[in-house]
Image (cartoon, rainbow, N blue to C red):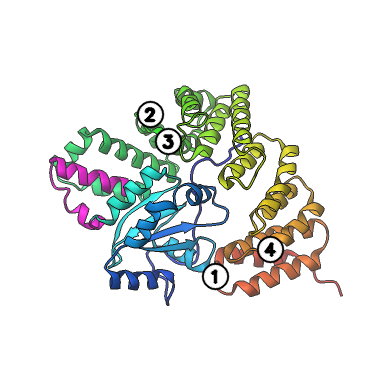
Amino acid sequence: MKRLFSGLLLLVAAGAPAGAAPAGADPVTDALEQARARRVPVLIDFTAPWCYSCYYMARNVLNGPEWERARREAVVVELDADSPAGARWMAAWSVKAMPTYLVFNAQGAELGRVLGEQTRRDFYAWLFATTGRDSLESVRTRVVDGSEASVAAAREVLRAQHARYDANGGLNWFLALPPPARAALTRDPQASAWIARLELQRAASENDLPGCVSVAPVALDGPLGCERPYELGKVMACADKLPEAERRALLRPQSELMQLLVDKRVLSNHRCADERSIVLTAADLQQALGNAAAEAQVLDRAIIDVKTRIGGDLRKDRNLSDNLRVYLDRAGRTEDLDLILPKLIEAYPEDYVYPYRHARSLAERGKHAEAAPLYEQAAARTYGVNKLRIAELRAKSLQALNRNDEARQVLSEALQANGPWFPEDAARLKALLASLPPATS
C-alpha cells in the first residue's frame, strides 16, 4: 500500500551521539551565557527551509506583541536543522520532529518542549507557563502520592516524555512510582491518556505489532482533537503488517472521527494549526480501508479549499501554498504539480526547496534531463546536510544520462566542502562515487 508520511516532519539528526554537547562556541553556548548574565531562560527554535510547520509558525505565531514579550523575557535562538550546529544539538537533545521549541533555564536545565504547529493562543500559553516553571527533573520529584499536586506534576512529566519521543523512559518512570501515585495516575483521565500514548509510541518505534494493536483503541479513545492524526499515523504504520481484514477492522472506527476532523477543523473557520496532517492522514486512512472514492474526495476538497484561500497568490501564505503542492502530489495530479512547482520557484527564489522538489518529482518519473538543471539550481543555494543529499540525487540523474564525469565532479566537490560533518550522508556519496565507471581521458 502506498504510504505517504503525514503528521509532524520527522527526521534523524546526525553528527553527534545522543547526550553529547557540541564542542566549541556556538549560538547555544552564547545564548546560555547571555541567559546567565540576564537571569532569564533560553528559548530554542529548531527550524529549516523545508519545514512547512515552520512556515505556519513564522507567519501566524512568532510575531506580534507576544513574540516581542518572549524576546524581552528570554534569550531566543533559532537553529537550522540542516546546519552542523543544528544537527549536533538535535542529537544532543533527542529532537526528532520539526519544528521543536525547547525552553531551558539559565543553568541549562530543560523546562519543557513543544512540537509542531501551534495556535497563537496555545503556543504562548505554553511558553509563558514554561519559562516560569521549575526544571523537569524538579517536577519529577513532586510525584510522590495520589494528591492532586502530584498528579498534576506527573501529567507534565508524561507529556514531556512523549514530546521527547522517550516512551521507554516515560513508562519506566511511571512503573517505578510508589503504588499510590501509579493508582492515581491510572484513574486520572489525562494522565492515563498520556500513558496510553507512550505505550503506542513505544510499540510503534519497536515494531511491536501485538502491543500496537492492543493499545491502539485506548490511545485513540477520547478527545485527541488536532493531535489525532499523529497517533493514528502510528497505528496505521503498525496496521500495515496486519492481514487486510484485521487492519480494516482496527482502523474503521477512525473513519467518521477523521471525517469530522476534516469538516470541522480544516474546512471551516475553526481550523487546526496543522491542517496538512489531518488531510493526509484522512486520505491515508481511506486508502487503507480500500475506499478510493473517499480518499479522492478528501484530497479534492482540500485542494479546492486551499486554492480559494490563496486566490492564486502563492506568496500570500507559504504554508498554504506548500500544502497545495503536497495535496496535488498526494492526489497524483502530476500535470497540476508540474504547473505549480515553477511558480513556487519564482515565488520563493531565496532558497533551494522548490528547485529541489521539482527536480526530484521529475527524476522520480525518469525525466532526468529536465531534473538535472533544477538540481544544479538547488545546489547553488543549499548548505549543510542537504548539500550532500542534493549532490547525491543530482549525481544519480547525471549518471542516468551517462554524464558520469559530471556526476563524479559533483560528488567530489560536495564531499570536499562537507569536511567531517554528516558522516552517514557522506558515506553514501563515497559509495556512489566508487560505483561510477572510471573517468574518461
Judge from the rendering whether residue 231 lies leftward or rightward of residue 337; answer left or right. Answer: left
Disc 4 marks a residue whose amino acid type is Ala
Q: Which residue is mark 4?
A: 379
Q: Quadrant of the C terminus?
A: bottom right
Q: Which residue is mark 3?
A: 226
Q: Quadrant of the N terminus?
A: top right
Q: Which residue is mark 1?
A: 421
Residues at discs 1 and 2 in contact (Cβ within 8 Å): no
Crowding near the residue tagged with mark 4, few <14, some 14–19, many ≥20 C-alpha atoms within 10 Å? many
Q: Residue furthest bottom?
A: 24
Q: Residue furthest right?
A: 441
Q: Position of residue 116 (x, y in %)?
A: 45, 47
Crowding near the residue tagged with mark 3, few <14, some 14–19, many ≥20 C-alpha atoms within 10 Å? some
What secondary structure is found at the residue carrying circle 3?
helix
Magenta stretch: give its range.
134-160
- Of residues 380 and 221, the one drawn nearer to the viewer in this rendering: 380
Q: Which residue is mark 2?
A: 217
Image mark count? 4
